[in-house]
Amino acid sequence: MIQLSHVKKSFGDIAAVNDVSLEVADGQVFGLVGTNGAGKSTLLRMISGILRQDSGRIEVLREPVYDRPEVKEQIFFIPDDPFFFRNGNALDMGVYYSSVYPAFDQIRFEDLLADFRLDPHRKIRNYSRGMKKQLAVLCGLCSNARYLLCDETFDGLDPVMRQAVKSLFANDMSERGLTPLVSSHNLRELEDICDHIGLLHSGGLLLSKDLAGLKEGLQKVQCVFADGTREDAGVFTSAGLAVLRHEKRGRLHTLTVRASREEVLSFFEKMDMVFFEILPLTLEEIFISETEVVGYDIKKLILL
């Protein structure tokens, strides 16, 4: 488990991370989302032990990370711009990581290079951006580190490679208990892979929730009333439905309500309707609803 308690980090007058507390449970994919400058990269660098927090506590497997090589062996950090030796090739990186991570699997590494069609003898400086991202992921997986911290890792990968990487993540989670922590400013990128989501803004954590739990308690509804006089949100709130968002185009109402599916169905069964349906909520819509409740305009915070 990764545990952070009241973590702060500043660079001069800039508070990059401000009083963040969160937990990343083993065996789940944790998505860390927010705009550029929200503090995601700084937070990942502190978790991996590259940076030291100014205050607060960071523990991995219930041990502090900074200046603890035996703990760092369980963490592999993939930055947005991965480091490679200037004149090195993929095999050189395998040799290097074998010296840093005792459990590095060289045989699997060479097999995956062949599967991803990455020439092991070609200079990495001649790789494309996407190929460099693929190589960094393969190094991370073959390190056999327990925690894989990915900073914008899927940016630059084509759709086929994204699915291949996600498949590898799923395999390693099942086979050896890998726990990926994936940072991104793109909600669509994380929706089909993450179990838990944390939202950062201006160095602070707005919320950290299980994705399934978020979806379970929110419903998106479109409807048209047979009675044309029912044209405002009062009809919903008077029945006890907590309306988080309400848009109206002509007679078509589109709402996001905090209620179970059963509660919504029970409400509309009693109404005279021309049209009614419950629609699936996207991760974007969930965050828009959740953050507007606490006074934030999510459209200004996240690149949708």
Image (cartoon, rainbow, N blue to C red):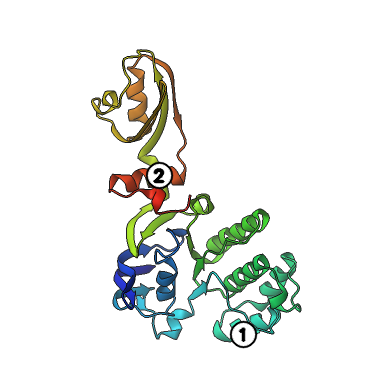
Picture layout, residue 175 above or below residue 302? below
Which quadrant of the figure contains the N terminus?
A: bottom left
**Would you say 172 lies left or right of 89 here?**
left
Mark 1 vs mark 2: give the one in front: 2
Instruction: List x then y, in percent, for residue 19.
Output: 28, 67
Q: Amino acid at mark 1?
A: Tyr
State the count of labels: 2
Identify the residue at horizontal 47%, vertical 36% (top origin): 280
**Which of 302 and 7 lies nearest the eye of the viewer?**
302
Picture layout, residue 83 above or below residue 163? below
Q: Of the numbered discs in the image, which one, if any, rests on residue 225?
A: none
Q: Residues within 10 Å of mark 2 (few under 14, many from 20)?
A: some
Going from the N terminus, do you reach mark 1 or mark 2 first? 1
Q: Please, what secondary structure does the residue beneath circle 1 have?
A: helix
Q: Amino acid at mark 2?
A: Ile
> In which quarter of the view is residue 93 placed?
bottom right
Residue marked by disc 2: 286
* Residues marked 1 and 2 touching at CB (< 8 Å): no
Picture layout, residue 301 above or below residue 218? below
Identify the residue at horizontal 58%, vertical 70% (top origin): 141
Instruction: List x then y, in percent, for residue 226.
Output: 38, 13
Picture layout, residue 225 above or below residue 129? above
> In which quarter of the view is residue 107 placed?
bottom right
Residue marked by disc 1: 96
Instruction: List x then y, in percent, for residue 158.
Output: 66, 57
**Which of 253 and 282 lies nearest the eye of the viewer?**
253
**Which of 267 and 235 lies nearest the eye of the viewer?**
235
- In 3D space, how far apart are the residues under numbered discs 1 and 2 (Cα atoms)? 43 Å
Q: Please, what secondary structure does the residue beneath circle 2 have?
A: helix
Instruction: List x then y, in percent, for residue 191.
Output: 50, 50
Q: Residues within 10 Å of mark 1 (few under 14, many from 20)?
A: some
**Would you say 168 lies left or right of 20 here?**
right
